[in-house]
Image: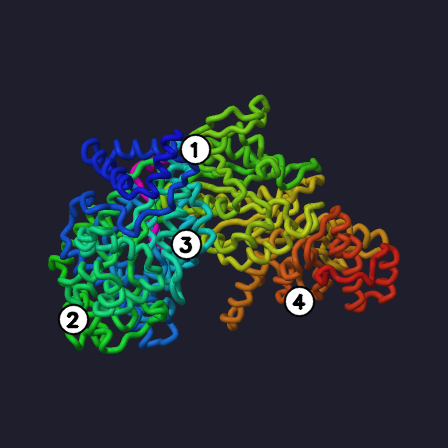
Amino acid sequence: MNGFVKTVKQTAIDPQELTEWRDALDSLVRHAGPERARQILDMLADAGNTPAIGWKPRHGTPYINSISVAQQPHFPGDLATEERLASLVRWNALAMVVRANQAYGELGGHIASYASAADLFEVGFNHFFRARHNNMGGDLVFYQPHSAPGIYARAFLEGRLSEQDLAHYRQELGAVKAGARGLSSYPHPWLMPDFWQFPTGSMGIGPISSIFQARFMRYLHHRGLQDTTDRHVWGVFGDGEMDEPESMSALTLAAREGLDNLTWVVNCNLQRLDGPVRGNGRIIDELEALFAGAGWNVIKLVWGSDWDALLAKDEDGALVRTLSQTVDGQFQTFAAKDGAYNREHFFGQSESLAKLVAGLSDEQIDRLKRGGHDMLKIHAAYHAARRVKGRPTVILAQTKKGFGMGEAGQGKMTTHQQKKLDRDALIAFRNRFQLPLSDEQTESLSFYKPAADSAEMRYLHQRRAALGGYVPSRSQSAEPVPVPPVSGYGGFATQAQGKEMSTTMAFVRMLSNLLKDKALGPRIVPIVADEARTFGMANLFKQIGIYSSVGQRYEPEDIGSILSYREATDGQILEEGISEASAISSWVAAATSYSVHGLRMLPFYIYYSMFGFQRVGDLIWAAADQRARGFLLGATAGRTTLGGEGLQHQDGSSHLMAATVPNCRAYDPAFAGEFAVILDHGMRQMLEHDVDEFYYVTLMNENYPQPSLPEGVEAAIIKGLYRLDGSAGAKVRLLGSGTLVREAQAAAQLLADDWQIDSEVFSVTSFSELAREAREVERWNRLHPLQSPRRSHLASCLPEGAPVVAVSDYVRAVPQMIGSYLGSNYTVLGTDGFGRSDTRAALRDFFEVDRHHIVLAALAALVEQGSLEAQVCQQAIERYGLHTERAASWTH
C-alpha cells in the first residue's frame, strides 16, 4: 500500500508517468473491453478510499453527453417527417397562445416552455409513450404544465380537438356558448376529465406524484392485484421546478425501491420564470450530483449531433474544458445571440476553439443544437433509460427556452412572459421551421393541419396506433366493488350501549373488520406517516403486514410480540416514514387507481390532523383536481382533545381549510356510531356510485361512553345535523361538534338544574355540509322567484325562534359558516388562537368552550332576546368562577 501511495504522489509531479497511467487504461479498454476497465477502476477506487489515501471521487462528469456516438442506437423513425410534425405542433401552439392574447390581453399563456420541450415530447409521442389498450394498462405521463399548449396542438393534429377548441384556449366559459370545448390553462383532470390524467400546474406536485405512482404500480403487482410489469412512468419537468421541496423529497425512496419503471426528463432550458435557474453555476452539474447521490441513473443530454464532429476534433480538450467552465447565465446569453456573436465570444476564447469552427458559417454556428432539440440524441437517451434495471433514471436535457423564437424571445430574460409576437417575429418563426404557410396565413395566425392523406398525418396516426392509441387520455372505467353492510363491521359502534372508546379506536376496529371482507378487504390501502402505534394500529402489522418491495431482511427486535413489526412484499400497509408529503402522495396514487389502473382501491390515510391541510394542502388540492376517492382521517383532532401536546400539534383550523375544497366532504363526528354512518355512506358513494369526491373525517383520542345510534338519524348525520336531546319548543338550542357535543350536553343539564331552562341539543357532524346545502337552496330560491321556495335541512332543524349557541373545537369561522342561513340569534364559541399544553379541562376553560361558558353564552343570548335579566349572567359568572378579565385566547 505504501508503494501505491508513493506512486499516486509522484503522479502529481510526473507528467510522463501520468501519461503512462492514461495509456495503460486505454490499452486495457482496447484489449479487455470497458467492462473489465470498470472492474479495475472499481478496485482502484476501493483502494483509494482507504484512510491512508483519503481519495474521494469528483462529483459529476464532463459537460458532454453521457451516451457517446458509438453507443447511439439506430433511429427507428422517419426523422424528416417527425421534425416536420414537431414544427407544425410548435406553430399551432404558438398561434393558439398569441391569438388568445391578441383578442383578450388578460388571458396569458406560455409559448417559450413548449418551444424548448417540443422535441422531448415528440420523441416520446412517436416512440415511447404507450396508451392503455386491451390488457395493457399503458404508461403514465406527467406533462410539464407550461407546455400544455403544445399538448393541445398535437391533439388537434390527431383529430381529438377541433380548431374551435384551440380558438378557445383559456376560455372555458365562453367556449360553451360557442359550442366548443374550452381548454384549461394547465393539466386539470377536473376540468377536462377525459383528457388530462394528472394535475402538474403547481410546481413540485408532478415530480413527487410520479414517484409514488411508480411505487404504487409495484405495490399492486406485489400484492397480486394487477400485472404492471411492463408499464412505465414518465415525467417531463422543468429545471427550475427542481427547487421545490416536493421535487427532491422522495428521490432516495425512488432509488431505495429500485423503481426502474420511472424516468424523469428534466427540461434544462436553464431559465426560471424571471431569469437563469443558476446564473452563476450549472444546474445540470448540480442536478447530476443530487440525483446520482440519491442513487438514480443519470443521463446527460447536453449537445446535439452537430457537436459530435467538434468534440471529435477537440484533441487538446479545450472545447470540453470551456463548456465545463461556462456558467448558465452565459449560456443563456449565447442562446439569445446569433452565430456571429457565438463565434466571437464563445469560440473566440482561444485559438484551439476558433479552429474548430473555422469551416462553419455564422448560420451553421447559430444552428448548433443543444441536446434536447436533437431527436436522434433524445431517442438514444429514452432508449437507454428504458433498459436500465434496478434504479430510476433522470435525463438532464439541455434546451433553449423559446427555441426558434429568435430575437422575439429565444433565451431572453423575459421569454417566459412572452404572449405576443409582431409580424417580423412570426415570419422569422415560420422561416426558421420551414412551415408551409403564406405571409397572410402567418400574420393571421392560422392554424395548420395537413390533409388527412398526407405523409405527415398518416405517419402520426401510425405511430400512435403502434403505441396503443392517443395520449394524454383519462378513463373512469373500473369494475365496482361491493360494500358490506355496516352492521357487520360497525355494529359495535351503532349499538355501542355506553361502551367507552375513542372514535380513533372505533375507526381502527372498523378498518380491521373491513380488511377481512373478501371483496373489499384486498382493495383497502391503509397509509400512515410513521404514527401507526400512536393511532392504535399496531395490531395490523401482523394481520396484513407493511409493504416492502424486498420483504423483511432482518429479524425484528419484537419478533416474539403479538404486535411485532412485519414487512412483506405483499404487505398492505403503506408506512411512509416521517413525511406527510410522501404519505399523501401514496394516498393520491391509491385514490386515483380507478382511473389510472382501472382498479378501484380504497385508501385510508390517518395522521395528526394539524399536519394535513395545513402542511400538505397543495397536494390535497391537486388530489381534488384529479378526482381522488378515499378517506383522509385527521386523528387526535381538535384544539382541546390532545392534552399535553400544545401549539404545533393541536388542530383548530383543518375543517376551515377542508371546506374550501369543492369535492371534499368534511365531517367531525362525536360518536363512533356517527362515524360508522359516514364511513358507510362515503364508501358507497365512491365505490358503488362513482361519485368523484373524497372524505375528510376528524377522529379523537379521548375515551368516553359511546351511545347507541338513535333510529332513523342516518340521513341527518350525512346532511350534517341531528337532534340528540330535548324537543322542539325549548328556550335555547345548543349545537356541538366533535367531542364538545358532550360539553353541550353537560351545559344543557346545568341549564335545567341551575337555571330551570330547557334546551335542545344537536350534534353537528358537518358545518361545511350544512353550509353547502343551505347555500345551494338559497341560490335556487333566488334564481326561481316564482316557484315555491325550498327549505334547507338546516332551516328545517333550526326554524326561526329560539336563540342558537354553537360550540366547536375549531376556530369560530367553522361554525360561523352557517350563520347567515339562520333566522335566530346565533352565538359561536370556538378555539381561536394558538394551542397550549395542559389537560383537556384546562384547555376548554382557556378557550372558553367548556360547559360553563356554553351556559353563559346561552343565558346571554336569552338576555339579548329579552327573556332574562342581565343579572342572571353575572350570577352564572360568579357561580362557575369564570375569569372576566382574562385576555382572550386569540390575543396571546
Contact? badges 1 and 3 (CB < 8 Å): no
Q: Is residue 376 visible?
A: no
- Of labels 4 and 1, earlier in sequence is 1
1 or 3: mark nearer the eye: 1
**3D distance between C-alphas at marks 3 and 4:** 52 Å
Residue 167 vs residue 378, the one in the foreground? 378
4 or 2: mark nearer the eye: 2
Residue 657 vs residue 877, the one in the foreground? 657
| Residue identified by numbered label 2 | 437
Where is residue 661 shown, x and y percent of the image?
A: 51, 57
Which residue type carries mark 1? Thr
| Residue identified by numbered label 1 | 50
Which residue type carries mark 4? Gly
Which residue type carries mark 2? Leu
**3D distance between C-alphas at marks 4 and 2:** 66 Å
At numbered mark 1, what does the secondary structure look like: helix, strand or loop? loop
Q: Residue furthest top?
A: 560
Magenta-tinted stretch: 225-237
**3D distance between C-alphas at marks 2 and 1:** 66 Å
Contact? badges 2 and 3 (CB < 8 Å): no
| Residue identified by numbered label 4 | 823
4 or 1: mark nearer the eye: 1
